[in-house]
Image: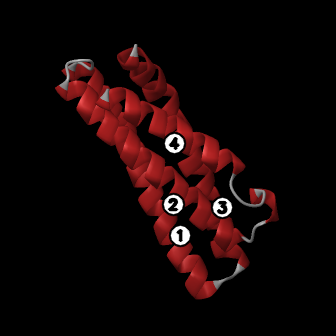
Amino acid sequence: MKRTLKFFLIVAVFSLVGCAGRPISDMSVEEKAYKILSTSLSVYNLTMQSVSDFQQDGYISLDTRIKINSIAEKYRLAHLAAVRSLYTYKRLSDAQTEEKLMITLDEVQKVFSDFLEYVEPILKEGVK
């Protein structure tokens, strides 16, 4: 029951993220950055907690957990790089730091997508 509830919470968060507020294309660079970083981090934290619970319940093997952690670390590092870029952009607000911020945000989205593509089927299988 606990696993099923967490999985459906993750699905609900994905749904809300897709529907919440105005379109990201209408946001400033800073707003986009905050939206991408905060949303992906919230979903990441909830997903990793579910992964931990699934492993404790025996639905995820140690090998699978190691692979998940490896992909998760790539996301974590990309997220930290984007946070640093956002900090620099807020201080300087020039075209060069904006470009660097957009590059790091693109990387966050790519790595986060890779993370979800790998983890989602595993969590769905564990709920069955």
Q: Residue at x 77, y 60 (%)?
A: 22
Mark 2 or mark 4: name the one nearer the start of the chain: 2
Query: Nearer the viewer's eye, disc 4 or disc 3?
Result: 4
- Where 70 sits versus 13, above or below? above
In this view, the mark in front (4 or 1): 4
Q: Please tell me which of labels 2 and 3 falls first in the chain.
A: 2
Q: Between marks 1 and 3, how big is the CA–CA gap?
A: 9 Å
Amino acid of disc 4? Phe
Say whether disc 1 or disc 3 marks the residue closer to the N-terminus: 1
Q: Nearer the viewer, mark 2 or mark 4?
A: 2
Going by the image, does 11 lie left or right of 119? right
Tell me the residue at 61%/86% (across/down): 92
Mark number, residue 38: 2
Q: Of the residues shown, which amino acid type is indicated by label 1?
A: Ser
Residue occupied by mark 3: 102
Task: First in sequence, mark 4 or 3: give its number.
Answer: 3
According to the image, label 4 marks what residue? 112
- Quadrant position of the N terminus in the picture: top left
